[in-house]
Image: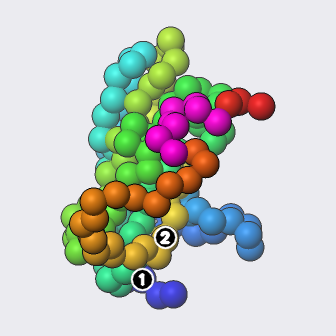
């Protein structure tokens, strides 16, 4: 799939690191380092603008290493970039650790996954088909 992109950053275009990678890393496009205090959040711009075909979205997801090692993640994960959005891609980062985290220019801060989606059409009914699970949710099937 070919996707139109404008790169206003000083960094290379996002790319797949391996042949089997689902996501491409997004880099911070900032003029000076940004310090995230514990529990603080910030929108970090990427300098990227894309034009997706209708029926696709770009999902902004956390980088597992950044989350596991530093406690920094994408707050609204996954964030959605809709096909009709033409603004700059921003990443809402949150520092869930108990120490400050400094974001440097060009640092890989999130990943972008391109995903196909369907549009739903609601059909109002009086009742739903019964299942074994029924209304059980939020851990009702157990943990083991």
Q: Quadrant of residue 74?
A: top left
Q: Residue at left 50%, top 55%?
A: 130
Q: Quadrant of residue 140?
A: top right
Which image quarter holds the C terminus? top right
Instruction: Give the mark nearest the N terminus, 1 or 2.
Output: 1
Magenta residues?
Answer: 134-141
> Is residue 71 depicted above or below 135 in this figure?
above
Residue at the far top in the pictured view: 98
| Residue 137 within the magenta-colored segment of the rendering | yes
**Which one is in front, 103 or 25?**
25
> Is residue 108 depicted above or below 70 in this figure?
below
Q: Which residue is mark 2?
A: 114
Q: Which SS class for mark 1?
A: loop
Name the mark on residue 3. 1
Q: Residue at left 59%, top 27%?
A: 70
User: How far is mark 1 from mark 2, CA to CA?
Assistant: 10 Å
Asked if the residues shown at circle 1 and circle 2 are in contact, with their CB atoms under 8 angstroms apart, the answer is yes
The picture places residue 136, in percent across and down from the top left corner, at: 52, 37
The picture places residue 73, in percent across and down from the top left corner, at: 49, 36
The picture places residue 33, in percent across and down from the top left corner, at: 39, 34
Q: Main secondary structure of the magenta part?
A: loop
Crowdedness of circle 1 by 10 Å Cα count: few (<14), some, many (20+)? few
Q: Residue at left 34%, top 57%?
A: 127
């Amino acid at each position: 799939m070919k996707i139109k992109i404008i790169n206003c950053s000083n960094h290379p275009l996002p790319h797949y690191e391996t042949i089997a990678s689902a996501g491409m890393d997004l880099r911070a496009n900032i003029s000076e380092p940004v310090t995230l205090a514990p529990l603080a959040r910030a929108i970090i711009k990427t300098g990227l603008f894309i034009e997706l075909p209708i029926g696709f979205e770009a999902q902004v997801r956390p980088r597992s290493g950044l989350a596991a090692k530093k406690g920094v993640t994408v707050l609204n994960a996954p964030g959605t970039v809709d096909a009709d959005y033409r603004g700059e891609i921003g990443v809402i980062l949150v520092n869930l650790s108990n120490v400050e985290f400094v974001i440097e220019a060009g640092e890989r801060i999130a990943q972008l996954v391109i995903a196909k989606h369907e549009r739903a059409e609601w059909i109002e009914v009086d009742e739903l088909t019964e299942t074994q699970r029924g209304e059980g949710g939020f851990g009702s099937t157990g943990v083991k």
